[in-house]
Amino acid sequence: MADTKNRSRFPGFIKLSDQVYLRPADDTNNTAVISGSPDPTTILLYAWGDAQPKHIAKYISGYLALFPNARLLIVLGPMIKMFYKSHEQRSKGMEVVLNAMQGAESAEERVLVHAMSNTGGVNYAATLNAYSQRYPGGSPLVHTLSVFDSTPGSSSFFANLGPWSRAMAIGAASWFPGPLFIMQAFAIIFLLVTHGVMFALGHSSPAVFSTKAINNPELEDKAAARLYLYSKSDEIINWEAVEEHAAEAKGKGFQVDLERFEETPHVGHLRAHPEKYWAAVRGAWHRASSRK
């Protein structure tokens, strides 16, 4: 049972770790069919950096409306953890996701992945890495569809320095009373220091690892379709970087769909155009599941 604090954050969910929350599947009707396509049995929702529960709730309610019987896992993304933890530590933290999925490699399991912003992408890549370490030499984590919302961006650290520091400053706005530019200055210093330490230790940045990982057939299921949701007005993730990543994926044989929004901010597509957003997700799922 979830305690009172956990219920207040995500009603109906069980806290599995400080980052992962689970809403168990409704086993009374877990084989429901919508428009002739089987529903997902598991949805993995990787939140953007420092996302607040009240904002994630919009995605939870949307998915419960579309696929009410699925097991739903929420993975939170504290941004500071993304930078000071190693790939191994991040992967270790995602083992709880694999434990909760309980047989995702079975033919009956139908998994939908939804990763938002670079932080969501980094935690998803860590999950893929954790799976490959748990089953060395085996197939990647089997899933039907990957939805990438406002991700991935450039894998260059210095190209990301401005957007990342701004994202960190925006995330800190709830507790930092000063002007945004002051918090962003602190964030830039923090990022430069952590990048320098990682470089000295021979570690690549989280963005480099995750951007490559989700286009690596050894880690990402090549049979899974993918949907990119992005905008030309995104102030954090450059739309051209998204399209370049999608083109690379298509060149490697991944099935790719793109849905571009106009004049919507970073991870703001659902808020501005909810009907278009969920129609894109629903359509991508139906296309992907019909090919299985």
Image (cartoon, grey):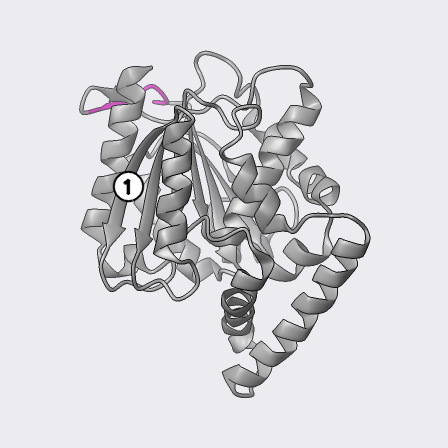
Question: Horizontal and vertical percent for residue 21?
Answer: 55, 44
Task: Work out which residue is located at the far bottom of the displayed protein and give it.
Answer: 178
- Name the image quarter holding the N terminus: top right
Residue 275 in the image, given as x and y percentages of width and height: 19, 49
Q: Position of residue 99 (x, y in %)?
A: 63, 29
Q: Is residue 135 magenta?
A: no
Q: Nearer the viewer, residue 155 or 118?
A: 155
Please name whichever residue, 77 or 168, is drawn nearer the observer in this view of the structure.
Answer: 168
Crowding at mark 1 (Cα within 10 Å: few <14, some 14-19, many 20+): some
Quarter holding the C terminus is: top left
Residue topped by disc 1 = 258
Q: Secondary structure at mark 1?
A: strand
Left or right: 246 as drawn, with respect to 290:
right
Q: Relative to 285, does residue 188 appear above or below in the rendering?
A: below
Quarter of the view holding residue 143: top left
Q: Amino acid at mark 1?
A: Leu
- The span shown in magenta is 29-34
Q: Is residue 187 above or below residue 159?
A: below
Residue 207 placement, left or right of 113: right
- Residue at the location (47% across, 58% down)? 53
Left or right of 93, for residue 257: left
Nearer to us in this view, 68 or 243: 243
In the rendered image, which quarter is residue 145 located in? Answer: top left
Q: At which x and y percent is residue 281? A: 28, 39
